[in-house]
Image: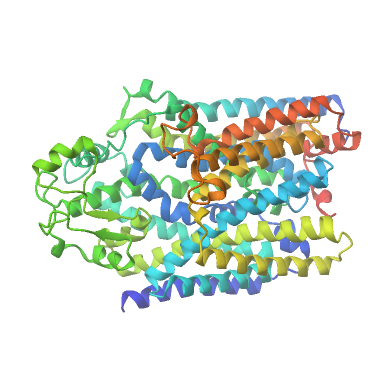
């Protein structure tokens, strides 16, 4: 494999874009909904408390799992598409 | 059968399984010893990571911490899981592609510097050794409570068991015992939680029970809990924190610290392919989440159970008489982890918040101070007894707590001993050492590390309690940023990386030492460790995230002022970015 080809560059850029998008969601559910934006979500009740509390104690963890599996699935497809996967 | 016999049966049975696995999975080569031969299935590895990661702190302490401070402790839940997103996307696949045995080895090769490798080894040893002391001490506590031996004897037994499977099997033995330990610990954690959730809410899934209706009062369980604890002067369980900034930074420190802890990273070296490293991270978080989604439910329900035990007729009525205290309180009093002092000499147990805001009400009720001191670490261990569950559940909890402590201890010990045998001995002192010689050196390093950790576990130095601040601060400020820059930047060079690591480390340690004492020596703190003294309200626990920023900034600034890394290093960075060829890379 030549690391300097045009395709390899495109593969790496696609990876960076995917990481960037995932980390925005990662930050939004934990630091956003779970902490800083919690007062804004206080109007949405969930079993005795508010949506922000749910995100802080459960919602963010569930989102993290979804993010990793989504990333793994997309990357493994990109690997094949750009021909950099392991045979 | 007596409770003691049941406990022996569960703990002894689980230990027997670990030892049998060790004999079956003996390491024949350094590759077996360091990375379990590199052929572990991603789901198996995910489970092993789960046990590796979930320590005595997760199993025993976390629910107790959440029970005490409610919403504010969500930082632990998010912080100790969110790091896996960073691992999956920023570190694990590329380090797997690099295909070597240790974390300092990558840093040394990528930054073409023995100095960088040495700094990484020191960071690794300090972070991991602090961490392992906590595990050994935790195992000692579990032994002393359930097997009625003193904690030093308990510690010795734990050390012998770890010795057998880690010295014999290295990473290979550790991997398969960790899988068994995961199964033991998750069953032990979940069963009592399911029972308690059923009793309180009728919902068999604790994570859902947390947001369900409390059967006895007909209110949502969190409302009920808020009401009961505010009645006796505590803050609301779901109350917001004073400083969002501090909570954000604390969570961030735990996340990047998690991603930078070497004993977790090296587990990703054991899978066959780069794609498997990505899947492993996902499976690891699934297995971790099974416990982490249950923990907040255990926390709130155990706190409510404790309050209803002390105030059986409601918080407006008088609390329970000391002579009528339940059996579990008596048993834990023996260990000194529950203490009762009848301050107003009325023979009843007044449990309330001794704060100025509650003083007036306490005076009217004739209360002269809080009388019951419950160590928060006992919450999970005492959970089955509080809920009146059968004896075998208690035996299971004992085995589970030990599994959590042992699995993490073994992972940490391997990280330390491989840094010594592979990075120090083969990397610097004796590069010409044979494969057989290195394997022997790794085994000896492991044995010595176990002895040191056991000694420190029995005689914990003052800083053992500061493990969170120290281990996560170091990992977040030194190892994580350096590893990430090594992959995502071709421009950062040897001088920049070393300067960044040292500045991040010194900055973080200084901030911790100013409030906690220099090198944790009592009496040497410059400022009292209270929110009023913290810079911008940032606690010493949260400073690692800022340390990471310092590391990044210094490394980039210094690198840009000095020469570019050589071409072959830039090619190395290219090659870790593309998965093809990972299999060959490992056979070095």
State the residue in front, B158 or B584. Answer: B158
Which quadrant holds residue B279? top right
Q: Residue at horizontal 70%, vertical 34%?
A: A77
Which quadrant holds residue A86? top right
Can residue B309 be seen here? The reply is yes
Label count reads 0
Q: Is the N terminus of chain B in the top left, top right, bottom left or bottom right quadrant? A: bottom left
State the residue in front, B222 or B334. Answer: B334
Residue B583 position, x and y percent, is 80, 50
In the rendered structure, the answer to whether residue B278 lies left or right of residue B289 reads right
Can residue A69 be seen here? The reply is no
Q: Is residue A14 above or below residue B428?
A: above
Residue B356 position, x and y percent, is 22, 37
Q: Is residue B356 above or below residue B347?
A: above
Residue B59 position, x and y percent, is 44, 55
Q: Is residue B150 above or below residue A49?
A: below
Q: Residue at horizontal 76%, vertical 30%?
A: B489
Which quadrant holds residue B321? bottom left
In the rendered structure, the answer to whether residue B194 lies left or right of residue B174 reads left
In the rendered structure, the answer to whether residue B273 lies left or right of residue B181 reads right
Q: Is the C terminus of chain B in the top left, top right, bottom left or bottom right quadrant? A: bottom right
Residue B76 position, x and y percent, is 46, 42
Visual colour scheme: rainbow
State the residue in front, B489 or B175. Answer: B489
Q: Residue at horizontal 82%, vertical 47%?
A: B114
Which residue, as the protein is rendered here, is positioned at the far top?
A40
In the rendered structure, the answer to whether residue A76 lies left or right of residue B152 reads right
């Amino acid at each position: 494999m030549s690391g300097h080809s045009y395709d390899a560059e495109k593969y790496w850029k696609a990876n960076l874009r995917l990481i960037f998008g995932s980390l925005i969601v990662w930050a939004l559910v934990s630091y956003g909904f779970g902490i800083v934006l919690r007062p804004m979500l206080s109007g949405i009740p969930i079993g005795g408390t508010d949506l922000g509390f749910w995100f802080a104690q459960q919602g963010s963890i569930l989102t993290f799992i979804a993010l990793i599996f989504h990333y793994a699935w997309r990357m493994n497809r990109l690997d094949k598409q750009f021909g950099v996967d392991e045979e | 059968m007596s409770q003691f016999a049941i406990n022996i049966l569960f703990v002894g049975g689980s230990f027997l399984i670990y030892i049998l696995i060790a004999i079956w999975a003996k390491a024949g080569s350094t590759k077996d010893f360091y990375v379990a031969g590199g052929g572990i299935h991603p789901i198996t590895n995910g489970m092993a990571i789960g046990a590796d990661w979930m320590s005595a702190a997760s199993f025993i302490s976390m629910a107790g911490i959440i029970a005490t401070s409610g919403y504010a402790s969500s930082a632990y839940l998010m912080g100790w899981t969110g790091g896996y997103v960073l691992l999956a996307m920023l570190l694990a696949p590329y380090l797997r592609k690099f295909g070597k045995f240790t974390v300092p080895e990558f840093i040394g090769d990528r930054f073409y510097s023995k100095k960088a490798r040495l700094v990484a080894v020191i960071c690794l040893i300090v972070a991991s050794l602090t961490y392992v002391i906590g595990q050994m001490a935790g195992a000692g506590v579990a032994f002393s409570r359930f097997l009625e031996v003193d904690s030093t004897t308990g510690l010795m037994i734990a050390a012998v068991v770890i010795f057998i499977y880690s010295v014999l099997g290295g990473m290979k033995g550790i991997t398969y015992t960790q899988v068994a330990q995961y199964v033991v610990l998750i069953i032990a954690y979940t069963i009592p939680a399911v029972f308690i959730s059923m009793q309180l809410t009728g919902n068999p899934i604790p994570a859902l029970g947390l947001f369900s209706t409390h059967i006895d009062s007909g209110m949502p369980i969190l409302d009920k809990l808020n009401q009961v604890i505010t009645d006796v002067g505590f803050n609301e369980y779901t109350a917001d924190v004073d400083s969002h900034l501090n909570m954000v930074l604390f969570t961030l420190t735990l996340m990047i610290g998690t991603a930078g802890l070497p004993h977790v990273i090296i587990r990703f070296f054991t899978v066959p392919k780069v794609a498997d490293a990505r899947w492993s991270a996902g499976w690891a978080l699934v297995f971790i989440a099974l416990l982490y989604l249950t923990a907040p439910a255990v926390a709130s329900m155990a706190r409510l159970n404790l309050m209803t035990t002390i105030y059986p007729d409601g918080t407006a009525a008088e609390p329970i008489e000391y002579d009528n205290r339940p059996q579990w309180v008596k048993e834990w009093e023996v260990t000194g982890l529950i203490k009762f002092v009848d301050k107003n000499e009325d023979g009843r147990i007044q449990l309330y918040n001794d704060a100025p805001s509650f003083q007036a009400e306490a005076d009217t009720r004739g209360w002269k101070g809080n009388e019951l001191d419950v160590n928060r670490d006992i919450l999970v261990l005492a959970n089955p007894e509080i809920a009146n569950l059968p004896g075998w559940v208690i035996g299971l909890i004992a085995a589970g707590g030990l599994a959590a402590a042992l699995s993490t201890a073994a992972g940490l010990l391997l990280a330390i001993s491989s840094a010594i045998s592979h990075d120090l001995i083969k990397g610097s002192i004796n590069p010409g050492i044979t494969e057989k010689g290195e394997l022997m050196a790794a085994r000896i390093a492991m044995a010595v590390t176990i002895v040191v950790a056991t000694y420190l576990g029995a005689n914990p130095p003052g800083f053992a309690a500061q493990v969170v601040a120290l281990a996560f601060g170091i990992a977040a400020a030194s190892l994580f940023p350096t590893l990430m820059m090594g992959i995502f930047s071709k421009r950062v060079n040897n001088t920049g990386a070393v300067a960044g690591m040292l500045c991040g480390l010194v900055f973080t340690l200084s901030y911790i030492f100013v409030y906690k004492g220099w090198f944790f020596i009592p009496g040497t703190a410059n400022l009292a460790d209270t929110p009023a003294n913290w810079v911008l309200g940032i606690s010493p626990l949260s400073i690692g995230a800022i340390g990471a920023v310092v590391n990044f900034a210094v490394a980039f600034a210094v690198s840009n002022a000095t020469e570019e890394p050589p071409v072959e290093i830039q090619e190395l960075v290219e090659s870790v970015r593309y998965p093809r060829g990972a299999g060959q890379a490992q056979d070095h």
